[in-house]
Image: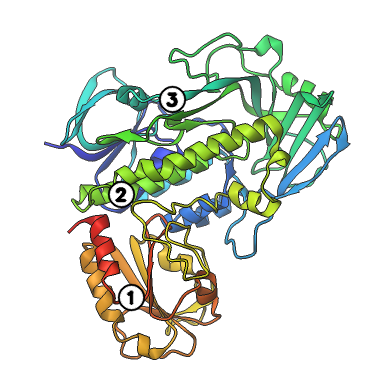
């Protein structure tokens, strides 16, 4: 007898993303966390544009935009002299920019979303152990009272951080090493006149090598920053190893926390303007490792986020990569719970996400050692990659072939946004992301001429049937196309943006997966490829 469909260990941004997406799909889910409450620390701060796109699809981007602050770029200083300014600029078609949001606010927003979906976090409860067979996972949980509970789930997701009990229980390797540097963090206010929205990187360099560093990331509030800097000797944890050998993260209760005087001392040495720090909200010492798990799961158990990959915080890639892990996995698990996951669907989680994790670990390590300016890519491509807008799964076993007969995104690529779409009853245009919001697979049928409409209703009906109802369909019509007899929901491409952005061809079917990546493109839409693809993905 199964108690719950999916057990999620860890209620950080990654676990909350997984739980919210599972609950939205009607999957019974229990999410547990060993902490009695959210930590009030601004740990992961940077929110990438791709994460905002995911939050748009999840239905919580408005709350995020109202809470976060824009992250415009970074001002650099070396030995007191102003260096190159980095502006975080993206092409105009990118719907969102870079943002700064304290992790506890991210968790609050995701937890509120989870509650709206009917779920909640069981706090003070820790996963102690588990075992699995071909049918279920049997887990032992420790409650706040000290009592233990045995729970049976169909699947288990370990979102329980760098020291993951789930990863250890699976016996997965976690290859990498610790960096020698040791830093302290502080959340403070300052009174300098530097422009708002810009991070600050100030260093002291001797013979081409930095021996002192200050990095400040803006936070919501007046002149408020999360600052990181080298740890002074009296606060050092050097030589102390964690029990599992994974040296990563905040120091917790181990030793004294940095005081305002420690932060002020670094500001006195490195701040580009004379300034006084005040209103210290929290502080800690932290250490950095770079590691990646040998595989992202085994059997009915999976790992995501820091449980699967850890690396330097350069570029704010960690939390954002973990959110994408969870978003990729949730829809696949939901299909499996419903009994509609074809062989290979769950295995595609490791196949698609582990290469992303490897690339992020390597890139952030390179940037930490040599600086982002040493990146070999051209600045525009590098910025898109930092924004995580270039993450894709071309060549994945669960996406269609790239016929290269189109100018737009290929199967596996991120589905881009575009504007100018108009419903017949709408007095205002909508965006593609509005059509994709809180949807499963979305089938888009494009008509450049009226004679291409004849099969659209039949194609959509067959696709919904092949996808066991886990599919929405709509037609996008060229501006001059009239479709009075079409039963399928339709919008007009009034500004021709969809055709240009997607390189759409008349009579084409474009299938967007639940995680916002293209699964298939095929012309003509009424050929055998679409139902065959859905069957190989979701079974018969």
Q: Which percent across, then down, holds residue 499?
A: 50, 76
Q: Nearer the viewer, residue 520 or 328?
A: 520
Task: Residue lying at the far right in this picture: please name it.
Answer: 81
Relative height, residue 173 to residue 383 (above, below): above
The residue tagged 2 is: 332
In the rendered view of the protein, which quadrant contains the C terminus?
bottom left
Q: Nearer the viewer, residue 332 or 401?
A: 401
Q: Earlier in the sequence, mark 1 or mark 2?
A: 2
- Disc 3 secondary structure class: strand
Q: Earlier in the sequence, mark 3 or mark 1?
A: 3
| Residue 17 in sight | no
Q: Residue at x 78, y 42 (%)?
A: 75
- Distance, label 1 to label 2, CA atoms, is 25 Å
- Distance, label 2 to label 3, CA atoms, is 24 Å
Q: Quadrant of residue 308?
A: top left
Q: Nearer the viewer, residue 322 or 438?
A: 322
Q: Which mark is residue 165?
A: none
Relative height, residue 488 to residue 64 (above, below): below
The residue tagged 1 is: 525
Q: Residue at x 29, y 68 (%)?
A: 529
Q: Quadrant of residue 369?
A: top right
Q: Residue at x 11, y 36 (%)?
A: 1
Relative height, residue 384 to residue 434 (above, below): above
Relative height, residue 411 to residue 148 (above, below): below
- Horizontal side of 302 relative to 247 (left or right) equals left
The residue tagged 3 is: 174
Q: Which percent across, then down, holds residue 309?
A: 47, 32
Q: Are marks 1 and 2 in contact (CB under 8 Å)?
A: no
Q: Which percent across, then down, holds residue 517?
A: 43, 57
Q: Earlier in the sequence, mark 2 or mark 3?
A: 3
- Disc 1 secondary structure class: loop
Q: Nearer the viewer, residue 459 or 69?
A: 459
């Amino acid at each position: 007898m199964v108690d719950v469909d999916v057990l999620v260990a860890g209620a950080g941004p990654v676990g909350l993303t997984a739980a919210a997406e599972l609950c939205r799909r009607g999957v019974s889910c229990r999410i547990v966390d060993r902490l009695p409450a959210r930590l009030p620390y601004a740990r992961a701060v940077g929110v990438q544009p791709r994460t905002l796109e995911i939050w748009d699809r999840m239905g919580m981007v408005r709350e995020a935009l109202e809470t976060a602050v824009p992250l415009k770029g970074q001002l650099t200083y070396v030995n007191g002299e102003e260096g190159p300014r980095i502006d975080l600029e993206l092409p105009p078609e990118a719907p969102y920019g870079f943002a700064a949001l304290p992790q506890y606010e991210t968790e609050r927003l995701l937890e509120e979303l989870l509650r709206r979906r009917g779920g909640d976090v069981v706090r003070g409860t820790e996963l102690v152990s588990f075992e699995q067979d071909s049918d279920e996972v049997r887990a032992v949980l420790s409650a706040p009272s000290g009592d233990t509970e045995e729970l049976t789930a169909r699947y288990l997701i370990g979102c329980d951080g760098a020291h993951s009990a789930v990863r250890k229980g699976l016996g997965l390797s976690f290859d990498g090493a610790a960096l020698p540097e040791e830093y302290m963090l502080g959340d403070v206010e300052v009174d300098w006149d530097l422009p708002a929205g810009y991070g600050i990187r100030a260093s002291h360099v001797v013979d081409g090598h930095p021996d002192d560093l200050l990095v400040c990331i803006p936070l919501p509030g007046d002149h408020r920053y999360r600052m990181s800097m080298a740890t002074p000797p009296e606060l050092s944890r050097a030589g102390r190893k964690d029990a599992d050998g994974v040296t990563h993260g905040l120091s917790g209760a181990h030793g004294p926390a940095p005081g305002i005087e420690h932060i002020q001392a670094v500001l006195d040495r490195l701040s580009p303007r004379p300034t006084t720090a005040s209103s210290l909200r929290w502080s800690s010492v932290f250490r950095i490792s770079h590691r990646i798990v040998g595989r992202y799961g085994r059997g009915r158990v999976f790992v995501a986020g820091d449980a699967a990959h850890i690396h330097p915080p350069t570029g704010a890639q960690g939390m954002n990569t973990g959110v994408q892990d969870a978003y990729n996995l949730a829809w696949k698990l939901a299909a499996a719970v419903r009994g509609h996951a074809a062989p290979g669907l769950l295995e595609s989680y490791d196949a698609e996400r582990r290469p992303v994790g490897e690339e992020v670990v390597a890139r952030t390590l390179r940037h930490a050692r040599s600086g982002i300016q040493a990146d070999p890519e051209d600045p525009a491509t590098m910025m898109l990659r930092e924004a995580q807008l270039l993450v894709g799964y071309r060549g994945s076993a669960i996406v269609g072939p790239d016929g290269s007969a189109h100018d737009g995104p290929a199967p596996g690529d991120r589905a881009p946004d575009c504007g100018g779409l108009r419903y017949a009853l709408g007095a205002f245009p909508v965006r593609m992301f509005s059509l994709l919001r809180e949807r499963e697979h979305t089938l888009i049928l494009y008509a450049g001429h009226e004679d291409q409409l004849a099969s659209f209703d039949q194609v959509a009906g067959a696709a919904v049937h092949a996808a066991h109802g886990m599919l929405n369909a709509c037609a996008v019509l060229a501006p001059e196309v009239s479709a009075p007899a079409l039963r399928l929901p339709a919008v007009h491409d009034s500004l021709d943006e969809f055709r240009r952005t997607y390189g759409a061809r008349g009579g084409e079917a474009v299938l967007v997966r639940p995680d916002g990546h293209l699964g298939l493109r095929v012309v003509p839409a009424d050929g055998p490829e679409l139902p065959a693809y859905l069957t190989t993905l979701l079974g018969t």
